[in-house]
Amino acid sequence: MEQLFTDIFFVRDETKFLDAFRSNIGRLKNKYKRALAFTIMNRALTRKVTMGHFAHTQALVYASNPDRIKRNRSLIRPIKDIFSELVSEYNNAVFDNGCECVSYNDDILKVLPTLSNVDLVYFDPPYCDSHADYQGFYHLLETYTNYWKDKEFVNGTKRYSPKKESGFETKREIIGSFKKLFSLSQDIPYWLISYNDRSYPDIQTLVDLISPYRNVSVERKLYQTGRGGKGSVAGSNEILLVCKP
Ligand SMILES: C[S@@+](CC[C@H](N)C(=O)[O-])C[C@H]1O[C@@H](n2cnc3c(N)ncnc32)[C@H](O)[C@@H]1O
């Protein structure tokens, strides 16, 4: 963190702290505590940086702008304080639902064929054409968590390279990817899919792609004041496609 990100997103004292903290996470014996530490630190880092993402190089400029500080005091708070404040909130969100829970971090088109006996699936894909480049936006969090030893770091933001394949980011590939997604979900009775009506393809096209497999209804919620995160521009609609047998 010190070598890559000093004076891009954080000052040197903070990047040094982050490196020390990262190595101490590995010393926690309990794997759930390690997971919580990563999760909470990821959240603290998005709080600390203007706009909550890492695709710009204005973090330190904005962190010295009084108007922005007034709107978001986290910009000048030590990362350690933001982290400490979040710990109890995240701890309180941990509970035992009595089931064996599993999470995967992989390409959905690879994971789906390995699953069986699924009752319901919720897909929350990138919003193609409005907010789709997750690697560009959140590379720092992934770099911090994985502590890559085998990547190159490019551009002003030091995004890692090569580009990770998504299939859901570009207009060129997204329709083909949705077709594969729906075809691979045929054995799952219920599907819920989030989208936005400013994104590509339009909602009618999605309905047409789903219709061969499921009865689909469209729920809409209008964004009154959104400023753009994840496609939430004022006047656009957040869409939930409810797909039943
Ligand atoms: C709108 S976000 C989902 C946010 C999530 N529901 C949450 O609340 O944190 C879209 C996510 O899809 C991921 N993604 C993109 N292509 C993917 C693929 N082929 N397989 C699985 N995930 C993918 C992105 O990295 C991003 O994290």
Image: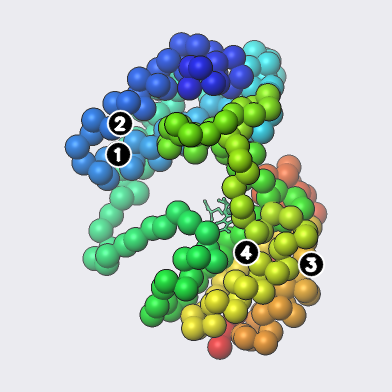
Of the 4 image quadrants, the one containing the C terminus is bottom right
Question: Mark 2 or mark 1: which comes first in sequence?
Answer: 2
Question: In x, y percent, where is residue 225?
Answer: 73, 46
Q: Is residue 14 above or below residue 136?
A: above
Residue type, label 2: Ile
Label 3: state its secondary structure. Answer: loop
Label 2: state its secondary structure. Answer: helix
Label 3 – label 4 distance at C-alpha: 13 Å
Query: Quadrant of the rendered structure where residue 168 is?
Result: bottom right
Per the rendering, the mark at residue 34 is: 1
Per the rendering, the mark at residue 194 is: 4
Quadrant assignment for ligand 1? bottom right
Residue marked by disc 2: 25
Residue marked by disc 3: 202
Question: Mark 1 or mark 3: which comes first in sequence?
Answer: 1
Q: Mark 2 vs ligand 1: CB under 8 Å?
A: no
Query: Quadrant of the rendered structure where residue 169 is?
Result: bottom right
Answer yes or no: do the residues labelled 2 and 1 have beta carbons within 8 Å? Answer: yes
Residue at x 40% of width, y 40% of height: 39
